[in-house]
Image (cartoon, helix red, strand yellow):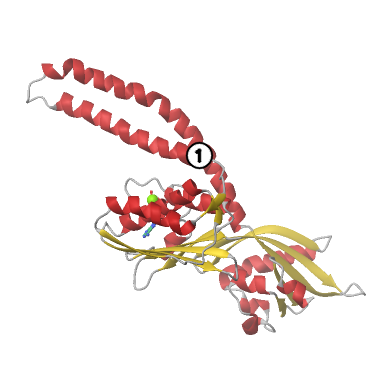
Amino acid sequence: MEIVLRNIAAGVISIDSEGVLRTINTSAERLLGLSSANVLGKNYRDVVSDKHLEMASESIRELLQSKQGTISKQIFLDLNGARLALQLHLTLLRAGNSEIVGMVAVLDDLTQMMRAQRMAAWREVARRIAHEIKNPLTPIQLSAQRLRKRYLSRFSDDEKVFDECTEMIIKSVDDLKTLVNEFSNFARMPAIQPEPNNLNMLIRESLTLYQEAHRGVKFVISTDARMPLLMIDRDQIKRVLINILENAVAAMEEHGTVTLSTVFDDVLKMAVISISDDGPGIPTEDKSRLFEPYFSTKKSGTGLGLAIVSSIVTDHGGFVRIRDNIPHGAVFVVELPAG
Ligand SMILES: Nc1ncnc2c1ncn2[C@@H]1O[C@H](COP(=O)(O)OP(=O)(O)O)[C@@H](O)[C@H]1O
Ligand SMILES: [Mg+2]
């Protein structure tokens, strides 16, 4: 039984009729950031933090009142700066004589799934917005250009208004077009076409082009020669790299060092790509929202870069995480399945 509990993805916790914690499996420890050595044998009331205690007691009350002796509901926990969405199943444990001897809680992590759902909803919104905005842009721009052509010469040098305003319309429409294009790229991201590819080479290729345009930044690259061929979509993984590099270079304001490394983890069979910069880093409160579409701290940012990264990496069956760089800066870690 213990081996089974240790190896399932769901968190499992049991308490006895007094409320004393009797079982906490590995997944529950990981999900809730607990160590069973510290909490087993204690009353749950002393372990659950104050802000979550009300919800715990409420759930237990519901359970005791339920006819079937089991309830299931969605809960949110704020732990270590991140918000977890969990499905909680509570079941009463009864002895042979139907006396209540405790209860067991099973926790499923819904955070990833909800991220994916939110992403799908955003894509739909992006698709519609792009469609609606795109159509009138070209006539607006053409009209402004025609006005200029026809009437600009009629104004003297003192009357700059006509010149400035038409120029402004044309430029603003250009900006809008760029934005709308990014929207529709995000909405219409093609399905991945995985083929055997040499990751190290792909990284070098992407970097060569990129380096040219950013002379103020030093790029350091180290690749693991043991890296096997990966089943990945070249163009999309390139897009992942470029989107992360763009942010790193912007955060450092074009000055500093970006380090790219690949490591092949032959135990987990994972390719690990790390991209670190020595910019200002990412504030803790932003970390959980970074991958959400339209989250941006930049004045003219779209907030789509990392949403696209997250969606491509997920499509490849991989993960992307953020770490703090030491002494300052951010590290983006992309893990892709290898073999
Ligand atoms: N390397 C980095 N250092 C600091 N902040 C970063 C870094 N990468 C991303 N960010 C933050 O994440 C936000 C979202 O990035 P992204 O999704 O690419 O959108 P955008 O670049 O349009 O703002 C950025 O606005 C920035 O605040
Ligand atoms: Mg970006």
Residue 329: x and y, percent? 35, 66
* Disc 1 residue lies near ligand 1 with CB under 8 A: no
Q: Is residue 283 visible?
A: no
Could you tell me the amino acid type at mark 1?
Ala
Question: Is residue 175 shown left or right of residue 101?
Answer: left
**Residue at the image position 7 percent from the left and 25 percent from the top:** 157
Classed neighbour count for the residue bearing mark 1: other residues with Cα under 10 Å, few (<14), some (14–19), many (≥20): many
Q: Is residue 128 visible?
A: yes
**Residue at the image position 60 percent from the left and 68 percent from the top:** 268
Is 200 in front, or is 214?
200
Query: Which residue is label 1 attached to?
Result: 187
Q: Quadrant of the C terminus?
A: bottom right
Residue 179: x and y, percent? 38, 38
Question: Is residue 331 shown left or right of residue 250?
Answer: right
Ligand 1 lies in which image quarter? Answer: bottom left
**Residue at the image position 51 percent from the left and 53 percent from the top:** 310
Question: Is residue 120 shown left or right of residue 285?
Answer: right
**Is 177 above or below relative to 77?**
above
Residue 336: x and y, percent? 54, 59
Is 162 in front, or is 173?
173
Q: Secondary structure at mark 1?
A: helix
Q: Quadrant of the N terminus?
A: bottom right
Is 273 in front, or is 77?
273
Is 150 in front, or is 331?
331
